[in-house]
Image (cartoon, helix red, strand yellow):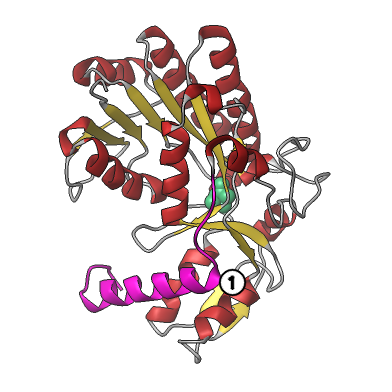
Amino acid sequence: MDKEIILITGSSGQLGTVLAEKLQKKYGVENIIATDLRENPTFNGVFDTLDVTDFEAIEATVLKYKITQIYHLAAILSANGEKHPLSTWDINMKTLFNVLEVSRIHKISKVFFPSSIAVFGNNIERSNTPQSSNLTPSTVYGISKAAGENWGKYYFDKYDLDVRSLRYPGVIGYQSLPGGGTTDYAVDIFHKAVKNEDFECFLSSETMLPMIYMDDAIRATLELMEAPKEKITVRTSYNISGLSFTPNQLASSIKEKYSSLKINYKPDFRQEIASSWPMSIDDTQARKDWDWKPKFNIKTLTETMLKNLELKYNNNLINS
Ligand code: AKB
């Protein structure tokens, strides 16, 4: 196997933090080039600041390190994106075009582009939402992801650039915090429980959404990226499913250990976004093409989150 040198954009984000570490273990610390807009002094490994909206900057990074693969994670998420719709579109699309173009010009072997359940909007079957649903996203973030999926396919069809993509549900992990998404409540609630603080939920108690535990999300990403090219039949983006729950169901699961946890439901603008998203996802195609199967259910997810956050807070590894 040729040596892979992997560039990650947005590496300080929720997924990037964990993915960078997993890729370092797999390919060697020196072969993972983590980048983000801002310095990350605590990052263990090779890190450069990089503004992905700047084509010359990303091209210089690709040439400097002789990059062979790119995981393009930098993006503005659903809830934050609604505060500045036009600049969200500009940033999400400009960064993607720069990554696709630099990959085409410099013959990058594989590109990973994260899509999201946000590509779905009203007019879908909300239960077991099929892979081939109509995409009528309700947020600028969702529109940028739906467009991005199609641009990925275009670069594959037209230039044979091997772009692969997953439609992530809400990702839940203890290692990092999400920023500006509609599913963020499902991480925040764990931090509040472990700190013995009350939790105010910005979604209503019965809002069912698809979620995935971090280990499953990372494993899905690596399994997709490692699958033989001929097995990838979806060149827009694969539906993947982890589990689905409501805030009420998650709270009950946490209360098995933290029985005094108090939750106040105060839906805000994010409720409308969540109500337009699927409640659960049909990921048959991912299962068929590259053997996808999630491992975590609500019980194992809750236990793992609580155990690891307790360790972190007790060792003062997180600011309380
Ligand atoms: C968000 O809530 O915006 C993200 C997502 C589902 O893509 N977590």
277 left or right, relative to 160: right
- The x, y position of residue 36, in whole percent, is 31, 37
Dot 1 corresponds to which residue? Answer: 201
Rendering coords of residue 47 (x, y %): 21, 36
Image-quadrant location for residue 3: top left
Judge whether 51 appears above or below 279 on screen: above
Q: Return the residue nearer the eye: 110 or 114.
A: 110
Q: Is residue 304 magenta?
A: yes
Mark 1, Cα crowd under 10 Å, few <14 / some 14-19 / many 20+, is many
Q: How many marks?
A: 1
Q: Is residue 290 visible?
A: yes
Whether residue 314 sits left or right of residue 209 in the image: it is left
Is residue 167 positioned above or below 320 on the image? above
Kindly identify the residue that appears in the image at 21 percent across and 73 percent down. 316
Of all residues, the one furthest to the bottom in this rendering is 260
Tag 1, which secondary structure? strand
Task: State left or right for residue 224 relative to residue 129.
Answer: left
Residue 309: where, in percent of width, then height?
34, 72
Residue sitting at 65 percent across and 45 percent down?
Answer: 283
Residue at 61 percent across and 80 percent down: it is 264
Image: magenta residue range: 292-320
